[in-house]
Every structure is written in structure tokens, then in C-alpha cells.
Amino acid sequence: MVKPWLLLPSKFAHDISPFFLNLYSKISKPKNYEWDSVNWRGLQFSNPLGIAGGVDKNAENINAWQSFGAGFIEVGTITPTPQGPNPGSIIKRYNKQKTLWNKMGFPNKGMENAYKNLKQSNNKNHTPIFGNIGKNRQTPLDKAHEDYIKVMDKINNLVDVFVVNISSPNTANLRNLFDQSYLTQFLKPIIDHNNLKLGKKNPTLLKLSPDLTKEQLALILDTSLDLDIDGWIISNTTTDRSLAPQAPTAGGVSGQPLAQASRNLLKLCSEHLSGKKGDRLLISCGGVLTPSDVYDRLNLGADLVQVYSALVFEGPFFFKKTANSKT
Ligand SMILES: Cc1cc2nc3c(=O)[nH]c(=O)nc-3n(C[C@H](O)[C@H](O)[C@H](O)COP(=O)(O)O)c2cc1C
């Protein structure tokens, strides 16, 4: 298949893609590719392959992703107020190595805009919608939970699952919220708010970093289990440049170089959670670039799988390609 977008500069291709996605949604109906369907706590996933955080930051392309047959759609990262990207170059693509690098820093139009877009999207085929939430750049870490709660309050009735994102390397010190000194103090008010004030309409997932040590991972899983989290997404981008020496030092790397780390982390999580996982959700994300990668992650214990880089290097028909390779 010809992929003309891979000939364009990465930032330009990134900026014009919503236009073409929306055009496609005007000419094509929503699809339900049914393979390995999942029913999780009443949510029906016609297939276990969805789009990852950052693909549809402002919930502007929900109808398009339905037309391409995504099994679920994560929107965001959404912050309370609008904010621009980090200064300087924010995205690079390395076609041969199937690698993406980004230093975006949650550029998004804020929760009011996401609310409006979510409300307008007519979720015709009832694809589960996940709302990925972050904090504004200037919000201090000890007040970070307030930002997450504001966005939860705003989008509660328009999404099916919340994703608490503290694993982006592009918001200064955000990953410090995984430290033992912060995690409970940060996560408990969020989970309490969801349970007590919002009546737990939506389950809450925590998106993890691939750069955690085995000990950190165990501590985070146990702490979040104690707080009764509903699942985890494994993982965000990596800062490990031994995996992608060609990428700039700041920022996060996705795609091929992340595959092994993300796969290993999934295995570690599955092992650590064995016997304690219950019906909690485990989502694998990172370096999934072929249909066989999707099945591999499911075989390793993932309940669902997400992609970002595959949509860039393989194109948005990746959902169809994966569904077809199953039949
Ligand atoms: C350009 C770009 C922007 C991203 N923005 C976000 C984001 O806003 N929120 C988030 O949770 N993850 C974000 N991610 C991380 C992806 O959701 C995913 O975790 C990561 O890219 C690994 O998956 P992949 O190898 O399939 O790309 C972004 C990734 C890229 C490449």
C-alpha cells in the first residue's frame, strides 16, 4: 500500500491528518470488526484493538476512528485549561526504524472543548470511549490531583473509562507522581472522588511508564491495587536512548524500539498480578506494529491492545488489516 504521508515532514503530516480522517468519516460508515470480542464490566468491545492516548487529543475524530473500525477510542490527554506544545521541535519520524519521537507536552484545547466535541460525536456503534487525563503544565505536583478531578467531573457522563496519565516524560516532573512519597497522596483523592462523588460510573486506569525498575513497578501495582484501581495501560513512551540513539535526548520514543521494553513490562505485570488481578483490565501499548504483535500481546496476558505508531507507519486501515488476518 502506498503511504504518501510518510514522505511529508512529520509535524506537517501530524497537523493535516485530522482533516483527512474527518473526510473519511463523511464517506464511510462506522464498522464493527468482530474478532476476540471483549465484555468488560458491561462495556462491549467488538474487538480488542484501540487507539492510544495522543492520537485524538481533542476528541475531534471519534467518528473517523469508528469508520476505521477501532475496538475502542482513547481521547486526550485532556487538561483543565487549553495549552500549547513545548517549545522547539516536538515530533520526529524515522521511517526506516519505525520510530517516533515526541516532546509535545499535552498540547490540547482544554476540557471545555473536549466536552463539546464528545457531546457532538454521535457514537453510532457504541464504541467504548476512554478519556485520558493530565495536569496543566503550571500546576504543582501537590495539587495535581485537583486537575485530574476537574477533568473527570467535566467528562464523566461522556466517556466510559478514565485514564490517569502520569507517565508522559514531556511534562516536567510528572513521572515523580509514581514515587512512593506522592503516589497514594495523588491517587487516593482521585479514586475517592470517582467512587463517592461521581458514583463510580467509570472505571479508572493508570497509564504506566516503560522506564520503571522491577521494584518500582511492584510498588506501583501494589499501591494502586490497595487503592482499588480498575486496571493499567502498559505503556507510555520511553526515555531510554540506548534503544533509540538517533532520537533527541529530551522527550519520549515510541514504535519499534519500545516493543521489547513494553512487552517485558507486560510480562512482569502479568506475573506480579497473578492471583490478584481479578477482573481488572490490562492494556498493552508500545511497539505494536503488525497484526501478529497484537495477538502476541493478547497471548502474553493483555485484555486489550492499543496503537499509535502503527497508525503512522501502517496507516489507519491497520484495524481492518488485523481483523482480516484473523479470519
Ligand atoms: C506524537 C505522540 C503524542 C502522544 N501523546 C500522548 C498523550 O497525549 N497522552 C498519552 O497518554 N500518550 C501519548 N503518547 C503515547 C502513546 O499513547 C503510546 O503510549 C506510545 O506512543 C507507545 O505506543 P506506540 O509504540 O504504539 O506508538 C503519544 C505518542 C506520540 C508518538
Image (cartoon, grey):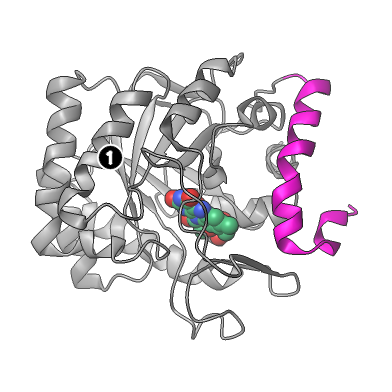
28 part of magenta stretch? yes
Up-down relation of residue 231 to residue 88 (above or below): above
Up-down relation of residue 45 to residue 251 (above or below): above
Instruction: Inspect this view and state whether residue 285 appears.
Output: no
Residue assigned mark 1: 148
Give the structural element (helix, strand or loop) at label 1: helix
Q: Which of the two residues, 326 or 211, is positioned nearer the viewer here?
A: 211
Up-down relation of residue 237 to residue 197 (above or below): below
Horizontally, residue 168 falls left or right of residue 306, namely left
70 part of magenta stretch? no
- Amino acid type for the residue under numbered disc 1: Tyr
Residue drawn 80% across the image and 30% down it: 24
Which segment is the magenta one?
1-29
Query: In the image, residue 278 lies at what x, y percent?
Result: 22, 38
Query: In the image, residue 177 lies at what x, y percent?
Result: 21, 59
Residue drawn 24% across the image and 34% down it: 149
Horizontally, residue 271 falls left or right of residue 313, namely left
Horizontally, residue 241 falls left or right of residue 98, namely left
Instruction: Inspect this view and state whether residue 113 appears.
Output: yes
Neighbour class for label 1 at 10 Å: few (<14), some, many (≥20)?
many
